[in-house]
Image (tube, rainbow, N blue to C red):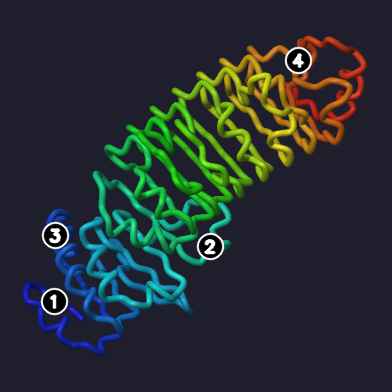
Amino acid sequence: MSTQDNYDMIFKISGLEELIIDVDSEMEDWCNTLIEDVVEKVSTLQKLNSFQFRFNNRVIHVIQVIDDTVKIYVPNELHLRGFLDQRKDLQKSSFQVYIGCFMSCGPEIPEFYRYDKYLKYNSGRGKNNAINNVLSEVHAFELINHIDIEYLSSNVIESMDCVQGCLIQNCSNMTTVVGGCHSPKKPLFPNLERLDAKNMPKLERIWEGRVQSGSLSKLKTLVLCNCPMMTMVFFNAIVHQLRELQYLEVQDCCKVEEVVMCSQNVSPYVIPKLRTLILCNLPSLRKISTRLDWTSLERLKIQDCPTLKDLPFDRDNAKVLQNIEVDADWWEALQWSDSNVKARLVRCCLFRQRA
């Protein structure tokens, strides 16, 4: 269907199932205004299962229903309330909600196929309760390019009980994922299995403050990439919760000095299921940890960590370690307190030769 100025009649067709609007214009600002206006109106059409704009050089999908999955795009958080009030299928179906980014930008979170209900929130600012209502349902959440958020507020985190996978990326003012004045009365992120934090210029730590028992208790995978202000990955308070952590990757974090910092009263058997540890391009890294037993560690990859001079392994720990990927010259420069440990581990090494 083609239309120019008067399209109000379209939104009175309550049984409308498919809608295509052809837009013959090169004016980007006018096109954005048109999309915002139409999206606000179209939320009342509960039977609409396919709605798209066709511009001269691109197609923008606003609503798509594919199999049992409802996909919805809204330009910003202010338009979300109408869909929540009108589209009752969001409460029972598999859904994908895109705020501030087109569906073509589609899920970036790894292993997306595992999640039935998904929210991607791009270029937001401030707080919005409608987003919290969606968060209470979703299994996967991407927070991208948020302009002013410093940490996830209490009401956001407490809405994330169902979230299993979370990607936080390019949030330029975030200093910690959990911070502020949190005094949790219940576990936070009780079902979170995967957390990725990427390109976070001010992120200093994952958690700040008191940790309620059960928080992050299902976390299996943590990936930190390009967090230049972070100096330590884990501190005492949080390591006790990481009983299910299996995969830890830290890359391009130029100030990280230590991966796990534990005091003497912390059991060496925390993080008991860690199987894979990847450390790449960490120029300030001096220590991995001196307290862990490395009970389950099977794979270790270390690359471009020039100030790391020794490994935290002795005769009694890391007994199942079977794959070590390192640079040959770095390995030869390592300091060993026991040559027998080096002889045992060298059999596990896959050496990379520098060009």
Q: Pointer 1: what residue?
A: 3
Q: Mark number for residue 115?
A: 2
Cβ atoms at labels 3 and 1 below 8 Å apart: no
Q: CA distance from mark 4 to mark 1?
A: 68 Å
Residue 150 position (above or below residue 34): above
Amino acid type, callout 4 = Asp
Residue 217 position (above or below residue 74): above
Cβ atoms at labels 4 and 1 below 8 Å apart: no
Report the residue at 73% width, 41% height from top. Answer: 273
SS assignment at label 1: loop
Q: Pointer 3: what residue?
A: 33
Along the line of sight, the residue nearer the viewer: 78 or 235: 235
Q: Pointer 4: what residue?
A: 329
Q: Looking at the figure, which quarter contains the N terminus?
A: bottom left
Q: Position of residue 338 (x, y in %)?
A: 88, 12
Along the line of sight, the residue nearer the viewer: 60 or 171: 171
Q: Position of residue 208 (x, y in %)?
A: 45, 31
Q: CA distance from mark 2 to mark 1?
A: 37 Å
Compare marks 3 and 2 and give the one earlier in the sequence.
Answer: 3
Compare marks 2 and 1 and give the one earlier in the sequence.
Answer: 1
